[in-house]
Image (cartoon, rainbow, N blue to C red):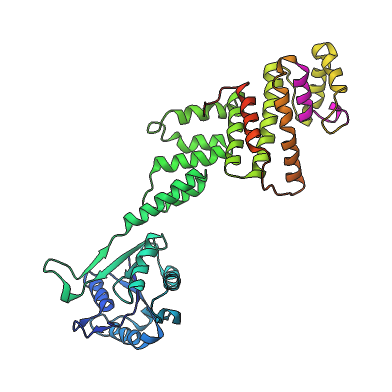
Amino acid sequence: MASIILSFVGSQDPYSNNTNQEGSIVTLVTQLLTINQPIKQVILLHTDTLTKNASDTKDWLESNPANLSPESITLRLVDPVLSTDPVNLLIAAQESRNAIAVAHSQMDSQDTLEFNASSGTPVMKWVWSVLQAAGYAPRSRIWQVRNPKEMQPDQERVFTTDVTTLKDEFDRKVIAQQVQDYNYSGAAITLNTSNLHHPEIAALLQYGHHRRTLNFDRAFSAIDAFREQLNSHWISEITPLRQKHSQALLKEAYFNALLRLKTQQYADFLVSLFRLQEQLLYYLVQEKIGLDISGKFSEKEKSIQIIQTAEEGRLHQFLKDYTLPGGGKLDINRGISRYAFQAIVEYYPQFENLVPLIRDLNHYCHRRNDSVHGFVGVSEIENESTLFNTLRQLMKQVTQLPEQ
């Protein structure tokens, strides 16, 4: 494991006339060599006003006792703006990030970035800690070099500063916001690149991501190895979904639609709403009424035969006379469409309280068709609160829902 040192050059480099000792850059290099830490590269950032200091520092590091090779030392002239007071933090951060990018291109998987936070202006010293805490340099250390005139007897001159707790707090806030936004895959990525990684939490985030995308088998696989450590309700919820229990699928479709509405993914919400209405109609026709018909075109003939014989032919006649919402007659010979299922539900009087609620969804399902087939964006959902209440009333009549 080798080190790549990054530092701004200060007025006290390579030698301090104030302390009559070597400056922080040379002192840090000497310290690392003393503990037998190989140095692969030294990248020195300098302003045009400190070009001589940078050149002198390079010469000093190439001489005894450091004896670094000339090609292992890189001088980088930074933006002239950094020569003015006060130093621009944003520009300092950009220059530092550019240097980190160069260092990353030269790093092996086990190498470490060593940041000297004791050379340059206060902003230049501080920016390394900011970038480390922000996650720009996962394998890195922040070094401080004390002024020898101000040291206490029990203090080391060269020491590291740990900003891990600060980075952890940043990561914790990001992950919490991602979870709040239902961005489980993003939260999993942030977790895996942080110091907060925990196998059970990572598994739950993967579970949430796959469940949100309706991939119930992969959701189960994500947590199966941790079933002893996790609350049993995670397994108990996913099991009926994997087994395609109609009530479980219906509730999942409902909450999936609400999730997209809450996160303002309006086009996706309309698709989910369309799927929910379809799922509801299938459930009512197939399980409540008991007609084994399908919307699949390959099973059309079988479904038509079932319709023709149901209710002694009265259902079939009702469908032939049925007027579609946009006008025109329903033709089941073209396929058992969503409207065919809706018409069947309307035929049976036990669903008279459900029918108006189901019809209220048709407008939004039409918008879904416009969005998907017409490549039309959706910027809002009109009468959102009314729609939410309609959905909740509808669902509470066919399945159990939480109170909130």
Look at 62% across and 35% down and name the residue there: 385
Q: Main secondary structure of the magenta part?
A: helix
Image quarter for residue 11? bottom left
- Whether 88 is drawn above or below 251: the answer is below
Task: Return the residue found at the far bottom.
Answer: 52
What is the total number of numbered labels drawn onto the structure image?
0
Image quarter for residue 215? top right
- Whether 26 is drawn above or below 241: the answer is below
Task: Return the residue found at the far top.
Answer: 312
Query: Residue 24's spot in the image, x, y percent?
Result: 26, 76
Pick the quarter of the image with the N terminus: bottom left
- Nearer the observer, 208 or 170: 170
Image quarter for residue 96? bottom left
Question: Is residue 344 on the magenta stretch?
Answer: yes
The answer to whether 350 appears left or right of 231 in the picture is right
- Nearer the observer, 214 or 383: 383
Query: Residue 200's spot in the image, x, y percent?
Result: 40, 40
The answer to whether 111 appears left or right of 187 in the picture is left
Query: Residue 132's spot in the image, x, y percent?
Result: 37, 62
- Whether 9 is drawn above or below 128: the answer is below
The answer to whether 14 appears left or right of 214 in the picture is left
Question: Is residue 280 on the magenta stretch?
Answer: no
The answer to whether 144 appears left or right of 168 in the picture is left
Look at 56% across and 39% down and name the residue there: 212
Query: Residue 167's spot in the image, x, y percent?
Result: 36, 56
Instruction: Write the start and end of the magenta stretch as one range.
Output: 328-348
- Nearer the observer, 357 or 225: 357
